[in-house]
Image (spheres, helix red, strand yellow):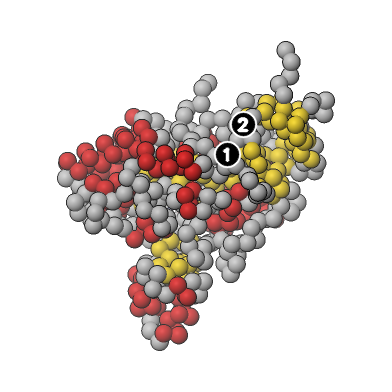
Amino acid sequence: MQDKHLDLIIEGGWLIDGLGGPRQRADVGVAGERIAAIGDLSGRAATRRLNARGKIVAPGFIDSHGHDDLMFVERPGLEWKTSQGITSVVVGNCGVSGAPAPLPGNTAAALALLGETPLFADMHAYFDTLRTQQPMINVAALVGHANLRLATLADPAATPTPEEQAAMERMLADALDAGAVGFSTGLAYQPGGAAQQDELDGLARVAATRGALHTSHIRNEGDDVEAAVDEVLSVGRNTGCATVLSHHKCMMPRNWGKSRATLANIDRARADGVDVAMDIYPYPGSSTILIPERADSIDEIRITWSVPHPECSGESLGDIAARWGCDKTEAAQRLCPAGAIYFAMDEAEVQRIFQHDCCMVGSDGLPNDAHPHPRLWGSFTRVLGRYVREAELLTLEAAIAKMTSLPARVFGLSGRGQLSVGAWADIVVFDADTVRDQATWESPTLPSVGVEHVLVNGQAVFPATKGMTRPGRILRRETPSA
Ligand SMILES: [Zn+2]
């Protein structure tokens, strides 16, 4: 049999397979959208050769927690992803997604995180538009529980009637049939926070029967974090639905250290057979909409956007309040609708959570923010530069597995997250000695350094070139064939 023609050989690099195995010297051959050969390919012909001598060649990173739902339409270049080596993203997190659109008159503050594009009627329409637009990177989508409530409940702040619950479950089933990989809850926000256990169990049952999962921004990440983790674990226990705890953290100094208990509870659930994973972003500050009730309890809050006061983006709430001659709560009220960064986490605890077996990396990046949290541009390269090279928290191979094969397994993205013959050619080439984030709290949109080449389905997406095609695909949840 003749060797298959290769479109590209990435030669001379150190291959890290994404499955946790030690790096090895190997060339990688790409034919079309797939990896066709791995090994010494010096004798093979190829249309193009890429010199990766001294560099790491790894599977493209999977961002397990994104909010780029509408950015595929609004800013389809997605440079904040490709420049840090991300080749796939899971969108629709924290209860909010690009579809379905609310009933007339229903709205929720958290939807403002997504962008300006009107929400789509349903996930079929969302995916149709993505297909027409051609995504730059691969995308797997969750449907937001807030969307389901807003699209079905006459009063989204209420408990659903049995008819409304049934309508939500039908809508979820329809979204999963359209290709959503699961549903997300944002129990810390309204209207998601109005949901009780029965409602969540009912939805999770629908997801479980279709092999889909439930991700959750839990009800409380501060004083009541332990109960909030247990609530979501119990949904998994009751229904058999696979569960992901989003951006797991313990906020406010008085709660630092509680992750010892939450991680123990997660371990117990896993030992009992509940399929649980989680994600973190590698920073001690969090970011979401501005919540005036938090203004007094967190010392440092920085504004990321504001509708009535766009000039305040990037400033600290304390400075704004001082200038306006009012207290921080009143300043926050005057800034809303707005977004903010909250400095209330312990870096050592973030690192401890990250090292847990089932913890992935999720940027939680907010590309629609005027002055975004730096996690948008720097999460993955920050892990490689700071957590691996500088702090030596874990090996490069183990860190890459957390960014590739682990999320591929959790979200059922078959043929992704590993470099092996037959796998999709999602590939990142980077310099392990120099790779790092540059985005900071002050300059949050600086691209990373050290990432040299990024391929999605065999096509180059970084560095960007003129006339570059957008090679991403919509990923459905599949269980890998044995
Ligand atoms: Zn969230």
Callout 2 secondary element:
loop
Residue 152's disc number: none
Residue 469: percent from left, percent from top: 60, 42
**Location of mark 1 (residue):** 471
Residue 463: percent from left, percent from top: 67, 49
Residue 89: percent from left, percent from top: 51, 44
Q: From the image, which quarter does the N terminus lie in?
A: top right
Q: Are marks 2 and 1 in contact (CB under 8 Å)?
A: yes
Nearer-the-camera pick, 320 or 177: 177
Residue at point 32%, 35% (across, down): 174
Amino acid tagged 2: Glu
Q: Residues within 10 Å of mark 1 (few under 14, many from 20)?
A: some
138 to the left or right of 110: right
The number of numbered discs placed on residues in the rendered structure image is 2
Quarter of the figure with residue 125: top left
Q: Residues within 10 Å of mark 2 (few under 14, many from 20)?
A: some
Residue at point 60%, 67% (across, down): 443
Dot 2 or dot 1: first in sequence order is 2
Nearer-the-camera pick, 219 or 370: 370
Residue at point 48%, 80% (across, down): 319
409 to the left or right of 467: left
- Residue 286 at least partly seen: yes
Residue 401: percent from left, percent from top: 61, 39
**Location of mark 2 (residue):** 33
Amino acid tagged 1: Pro
Q: Is mark 2 within 8 Å of ligand 1?
A: no
Residue at point 71%, 52% (across, down): 450
